[in-house]
Amino acid sequence: MRLRAEKGKLKIEHSIIDGLRPVLERLLRDDANIRSIIPGVIRPVRDAKGEPVIRLTVPTATGWKGIALSAGARQELFINTALAKPDLEELIKHALKPK
């Protein structure tokens, strides 16, 4: 069974770490250039405390791979977009700010 949110752009077939889902929904709502976000594997880490943080790591064939850190865990994010890294980082920065 596939579940999707924000007009079918956020794949939520798997769990999403605490506090990250609202950030991803804001990111999708704020920019139409992001085609989809697919959360991936969650792994425990010691240094992920406080509010969510998203770092872009490597380009993929369809966009960017990122790592989200929050609540003692890290989660892979696959962001399907044609945006350049600096533009996407700016959008992420704005989405991380609570509104």
Image (cartoon, helix red, strand yellow):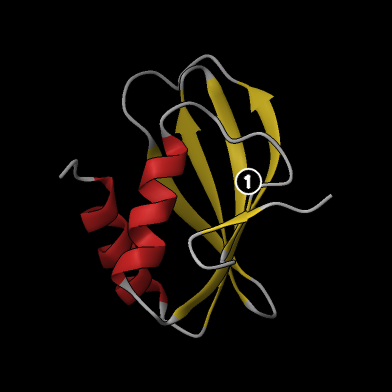
x, y percent for residue 56: 47, 57
Q: Which residue is farthest right?
A: 1
Which sits in the foreground, 61 or 1? 1
Name the residue: 68% across, 26% down: 43
Residue 29 falls left or right of residue 34:
left
Residue 42 image position (x, y, % from top left): 68, 32
Left or right of 98 on screen, residue 63: right
Where is residue 66, by image quadrant? bottom right
Q: Position of residue 76 (x, y in %)?
A: 63, 46
Amino acid residing under circle 1: Glu
**Residue at the limit of the structure toward the left, as seen here:** 99
User: How many marks can you see?
Assistant: 1
- Residue drawn at (46%, 19%), measured in percent from left and top? 71
| Quadrant of the rendering where the C terminus is positioned | top left
- The vertical placement of 50 against 81, above or below, is above
65 up-or-down from 98: above or below: below
Please name the residue that numbered disc 1 is placed on.
Answer: 76
